[in-house]
Image (tube, rainbow, N blue to C red):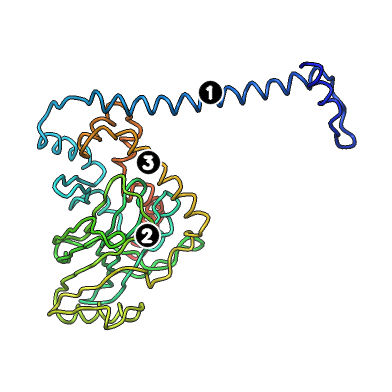
Amino acid sequence: MYNYIVEIASKMPLPLGVIIPNPIYIAALILLVCVFEIIVTILLIRRKEIRKETALEVIKNPIPDKNSSIDKVNLLNEELATYGFAYMPEKDIFYSIMNGWQRSFGYCQLYDEMAVTISLVIDCEPIRFEYGGKKWMIEFWKGQYGMTTGSEIGIYTTTGPDLDIPGFFNGTFYQSAKDEDFLQMSMVLRKNDEILYKVSGLHWWLTAFRLGEFSHPSELVVDIEITLRDSEMRDAFVNELLAVGYTQEDLTIINNTVSLTFDKPHSKQPFTRIPLTEYLMQKNNEQNCNAYKVLTKGYENTLKKLEYLKNEEPKMYRHILNMGKSRQFFGEYDTIRNFIQKNDILNR
């Protein structure tokens, strides 16, 4: 066997100018590569076996309940509050809390450009208009947020000038809506005509996310209802919807409440969301969702699944808690804030 390998390796053609090494060196190198491949194959097979054994063990010996469901929800929500979210067991969804840290970071187009780079493959629909001496933006989102499928409606305002940061950003930077600018909103998220959830509330950022659900944005449709403050605000909002590409037939208007369906976005999508980037991120998202399902197969509800992951797969557990729009998403905020602060000092 050794002589056979040496003979083949010695006869392999080499580029001009390359020194032919000793046949023993060639054979040793080939054997080393073969051994490495065998070891890698064994490790991959063993990894699959361990995952299967873990899943079966979970089914046979689930972790016993130590706390009531209410206690578990409270404990989970204490941890989630740090990330700006909470869990609603009756609908099996995660949602944004009123005063999560995200409220301090405002919003601008740069954030949407960042989304796909951190595995948020989402459709965006910003609706910009002016009302009451302020610039307003009400934006809709839907799609895959890492290991969750979800949707959002956000309300943002500003009275400041547009920003012009050379080589970085040129446009409007909005602050998250103040308490007096909250609007009554509702969302119904449907995937391939099946309702995933319904949510509503008086809020500045209405959200909902379903853990372990993998979706492409094109599979999702959001039925949206927003009650504006008065007829003037309603008309300003409706006129911008029409300017973006919605038609009168797409809208249902009752008093100051506007209803519409957010399906295929009419707005230009972020330039970073190219097919290759979206494919790679969605491949990763799908693999993570599948891993979550395999590892938690033995548990019948999200609370028990998360309890298991917290004890046995803490890395995945932390990844799940860091859902939605994480701090990475707002990575450009410091540059924007510093620019605004310098301008404020100069204009005093």
Residue at image mark 2: 217
Camera-side residue: 99 or 208?
208
Instruction: Identify which residue is drawn at 39% across, 59% down.
Output: 112
Check disc 2 and give the amino acid type. Pro
> Which label's residue is closer to the chain start, 2 or 3?
2
Label 3 SS: helix
Rendered view: 87 above or below 8: below
- Taking depth in this image into account, of 1 and 310 the one nearest to the observer is 1
Q: Nearer the viewer, mark 2 or mark 3?
A: 3
Split into 4 quadrants, where in the image is the N terminus?
top right
Which image quadrant is residue 68 in?
Answer: top left
Residue 209, percent from left and from top: 26, 51
Q: Mark 1 points at which residue?
A: 42
- Image location of residue 107, percent across then percent down: 33, 60
Q: Which amino acid does label 1 sit on?
A: Ile
Q: Which quadrant of the rendered structure holds the C terminus? A: bottom left
Residue 290's label in the rendered image is 3
Q: Which of 6 and 309 is in front in this view?
A: 6
Name the kind of residue labelled 3 in the image. Asn
Residue 196 as seen in the image, left or right of residue 126:
left
Q: Alpha-carbon distance for marks 3 and 1?
A: 22 Å
